[in-house]
Image (tube, rainbow, N blue to C red):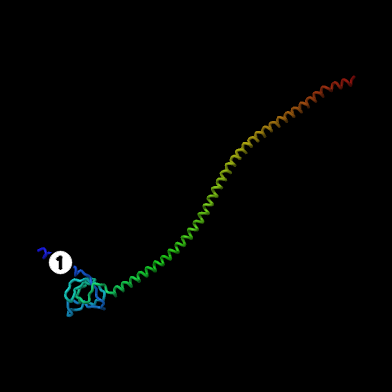
Amino acid sequence: MRCALVLGIFLFVLPITLFAETRYVSEVREITLRTGPGAEYKITSMIKSGTPMTVLEQSEDWTRVQLTGDKEGWVLAQFLQTKVPDAILLENLQKKHVSLSAEANTLTTENQDLREKVATLTTDLDSYRGRYDTLNATHETLKTESTDFLELQTTHEATMKELETQKEKADRLENELSSLITDKRLKWFLLGAGVLLVGIVLGFITKPQRRRSSLL
């Protein structure tokens, strides 16, 4: 019973595996697709070599197949093979070669563009480095000059304070000198006035004496 069950499953699965198989038209140029398994059936289309199709049913000489687009029919089994025809392989390889050649040309062009961009970026980088060195040197100079400027500013402020102090002293001395000169002039004036006054007094006193002596 178990052997019969296994055999039945095997016989059921085998046609499904066979019918799901993809086959190709062999190296002939074209074969006919007919409505039934025989030469007496109507031809519906001509199938070129290398056309893939799915096996739906297998008989002794004829095979029912399904083409792309759900088109079905019968073809002679002797013109079918599971291996992809060499002509199709060659055509596919040629297409692949063309595609790879085009891709290689594209990559070559892109590589050239990248080289030019790298050269441009290298030039720009050198320029930026030169500008950086210049700016860095300018920065260092400004730092030095700023330090000197701060020192000069500090010295200038100290000098101005000292100058202001000396000016205040000079103004004070000038005021004192002016005061002294004024006092001295006043003293000389008073002295002169005193001398003059003494002279007048002496003159006044001596006049009567002269008159008396003349009278004697």
Tell me which residue sits at (70%, 31%) in the image.
180
* Amino acid residing under circle 1: Phe
Q: Which of 141 and 187 is in front in this view?
A: 141
Residue 88 at x, y percent in the picture: 29, 74
**Dot 1 alpha-carbon crowd within 10 angstroms: few under 14, some 14 to 19, many 20 or more:** few
Tell me which residue sits at (83%, 22%) in the image.
206
Image quadrant containing the C terminus: top right
The residue labelled by disc 1 is 10
Q: Nearer the viewer, residue 97 or 45?
A: 97
Residue 50 at x, y percent in the picture: 26, 74
* Element at label 1: helix
Quarter residue 150 falls in: top right
Tell me which residue sits at (17%, 68%) in the image.
14
Tell me which residue sits at (66%, 33%) in the image.
173
149 sits to left or right of 187: left
In the image, residue 212 sits, relative to residue 125, either above or below, namely above
Tell me if residue 48 can be seen: no
4 sits to left or right of 120: left
In the image, residue 111 sits, relative to residue 151, either above or below, namely below
Residue 72 at x, y percent in the picture: 20, 73
Residue at the right extreme of this rendering: 216
6 sits to left or right of 127: left
